Amino acid sequence: MRTLPKRLKKGDTVGVIAPSSPPNLENLKKALPFLEELGLHVKMGKSVEEKRGYLAGDDDARLSDLHAMFEDPEVAGIICAGGGYGAARYTDRIDFGMIKENPKVFWGYSDITFLHTAIGQYAELVTFHGPMLASDVGKDEFHERSGRMFGQLFSPFELHYSEEISPLTAIRGGVAEGELVGGNLSLLRSGIGTKFEIDVKGKILLIEDIDEEPYRVDEMLNHLRMARKLDEVAGIVIGDFKNPEPKKPDKSLTLDQVFEDYFKEMKVPVVKGFKIGHCEPHFSVPLGVKARLDGDAKTLTILPGVE
């Protein structure tokens, strides 16, 4: 069982870091009042405003921020400013032993998926797949429901997802129970063959992505299939795949056809349509806790992510 981080409380300080690309600083500034409304103080990472091409400062600076926030006893949780690219560049140098000794809330998604998988498997910590400050919270379209999802950090409660939230489609029925793992499909695929390859055996796998044409999603799912990942899962939760439109629609499968090709013959529940990912509202979930996917009732139930 992974360690549950301690719940946040009003008056706590959260660290804000940019583990990947440089965040939009204007949007980040707009997001800070949201954290204040939650009763939180903010400590900004040193590399948040740095730029090195498509990276928020060099690898050492971003790694140093991650380590500093986990080590700092005054910081109760860590929220990522944004994703983009670059977290995997230093993941092999993370001090997982130190993180294991200092378990705390860690929240983000997209490129942060690589860190979720690594921290989950090597520091045995439950982490959170949820909207980030500059990428989501600081934008005008940030949805009230997305904001409410931060409530799970302050009080341990079960999450229930049903068709009351969004229409769902069961590609395969049945019921599965297991740890919820996963996140961004392209980051999960990029970990295969490394020491950060995701362990999906007996687990419920969440996948989502953005700006990937159907043939690209096909190629990534085929990689997972040939790596035997699809043989090992207990179930699959298909989150939001934003902007999947092919450039040449007349010469492309649809995304739904791709999902059918890979999942319709599986012997485990596979349900699509979850508003988890690059979408509004964004249903935030803890990773590394027990979940129950019911393909017949089209529901997903997830245990609390904090203690």
Image (tube, rainbow, N blue to C red):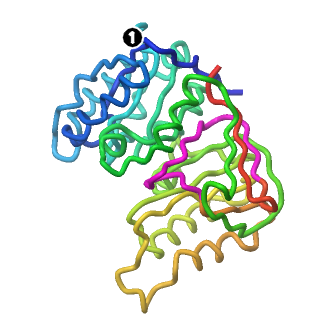
Residue 275 falls inside the magenta stretch: yes
Residue type highlighted by circle 1: Asp
Which residues make up the magenta segment?
A: 274-293
Q: Which quadrant is the N terminus positioned in? A: top right
Answer above or below: position of 14 versus 147.
above
Q: Residue at x 23, y 37 (%)?
A: 56
Residue shown at 39%/10% (left/top)? 72
Is residue 266 or residue 158 the one in the foreground? 158
| Residue 224 point in image, percent of width and height | 59, 60
Magenta stretch encompasses residue 279: yes
The image shows residue 202 at horizontal and vertical percentages of 76, 46
Q: Residue furthest bottom?
A: 250
Residue drawn at (59%, 79%), measured in percent from left and top?
257
- The picture places residue 120, in percent across and down from the top left corner, at 57, 32
Q: Is residue 239 above or below residue 29?
A: below
Image: 12 above or below 286:
above
* Foreground residue among 135 and 110: 135
- Circle 1 sits on which residue? 72
SS at badge 1: loop
Asked whether, in this view, residue 163 is left or right of residue 31, the answer is right
Q: Dot 1: within a 10 Å radius of its alpha carbon, few (fewer than 14), some, or many (20 or more) residues?
A: few
